[in-house]
Amino acid sequence: MSIHDALFDRARGVLAGGVSSPVRAFKSVGGTPRYVSRGRGATMFGEGGEAWTDFCLAWGPLILGHAHPEVIEAVQRAVADGLAFGTPTRAEIELGERILSGYPGRDRCRLMCTGSEAVMTALRLARAHTGRERILKFSGCYHGCADAMLVKGGSGLVSFGIGDSAGVPAGAAADTVVVPLDDEEALANAFAQHGHTLAAAIVEPVPANNGLLVQRPEWLRRLRELCSAHGALLIFDEVITGFRFHYGGYERVVDVMPDLVTLGKIVGGGLPVSAVVGPAAILDRLSPAGSVYQAGTMGGNPVALAAGNATLDVLSRGDVYRHLAMLGEAFDAMPKGKVQWVRHGPIVWPWLGDGAPPRTDAGLDPAVKPRYNELFHRWLNSGVYFPPSAFEVGFLCGSHTVGDLEKLVG
Ligand SMILES: Cc1ncc(COP(=O)(O)O)c(C=O)c1O
């Protein structure tokens, strides 16, 4: 029995399902999850003495790689001063300023701990601001585990939500309208039918939780127009994309301005920080300035903010983005064998289906799963760690080298 088998056996005796978040259990790829003890740069070290070049990178926060010296030093300094105060601190002003400097034209942010919490707050704000209750989301986009977002919808052009999870009250899911991605006609129909009742449309501007379903900029522009025409807010869920393509939001890449933005992952640099960003006219509805309630014992925790501040400080210098652009070009030029790789900025995904990579979740053929599982275990046994699911994406980071990419696609 390997050390990983022994630990997972022990974990199943105390932790629900043996893990603290479901995909980590390797249910989709089979086998035993690997227990990790340490990370440095692009490498993650296992309890069994293994070393993997890591493309999962904690599911996205580690754009600088593991244990970046400036981030670790900032966190150590913060830790030495105390872990939490439950008062305002200078660090939250600094992180707020750093975040807003990446989102020109926005006046406010509220700091929280998880992406799910940021999405839940953005939806509440949108509902309060518009006085409407319905939310439009897109099939295949993931927005965390708040009740109203655990819905992907059934077949048909537009469908009302049915919860994907047990325990979601029918009422919570019923106000979620679900529409397919990449389909202007379905979008127009949904707005014609429900536009006057929609508080907001929420979208991952680069859907990256069900494969990498890169959307056409024209489609995002059409979504913006329809939201404006019907008085619904547009929310970009940038928990994955925020500060990943450049210092700021995906809005600059596609030239589409959302009304609200949700952030997570990179803004915490590996510790739990998330944010909602927007204009004062909306964000000042949050308590205590306004009547929309949101609060958190750990919101703006100084140790977590130290990691976020240090990460954004490094990113603001620009060389990490230049390195990622260089890696992207090198990646494109590499021979890839049978795998069709989709790359958008520093996000990569192996598509093992037969046709062109899909742009909607309906195009995700489950038949690719056994092919992916074989590839995944081959990687795992040869020193490459990619996310344990056929429909999760990998990330490039500032510590990867061209040689690391060759290991991935070679
Ligand atoms: C786009 C998007 N939104 C929201 C979330 C939820 O964030 P968290 O896991 O921090 O709650 C995720 C998590 O992966 C995400 O990818």
Image (tube, helix red, strand yellow):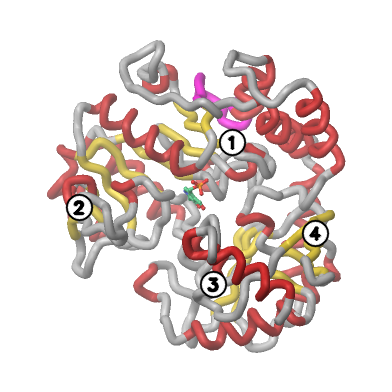
Task: Give SS at disc 3.
Answer: loop
Residue, x 65% and y 15% (percent of image)? Answer: 89
2 sits left or right of 283 in the view: right
Residue position for label 1: 273
Q: Can I make out residue 214 in this image? A: no
Left or right, 194 with reference to 344: left
Q: Which residue is mark 2?
A: 190
Closer to the camera, 25 or 321? 25
Task: Give the image quarter of residue 409.
Answer: bottom right
Q: Amino acid at mark 4?
A: Ala
Please report contact status of discs 3 and 4: CB closer than 8 Å, yes or no. Answer: no
Specify whether residue 294 is in view: yes
- Which numbered disc, 4 or 1, marks the residue that appears first in the sequence? 4
Q: Please tell me which residue lies in front, 86 or 162.
A: 86
Give the distance between the C-alpha atoms of the residues marked 2 and 1, in whole angstroms: 34 Å
Extent of the magenta region? 100-110
Residue at 74%, 55% in the rendered image: 397
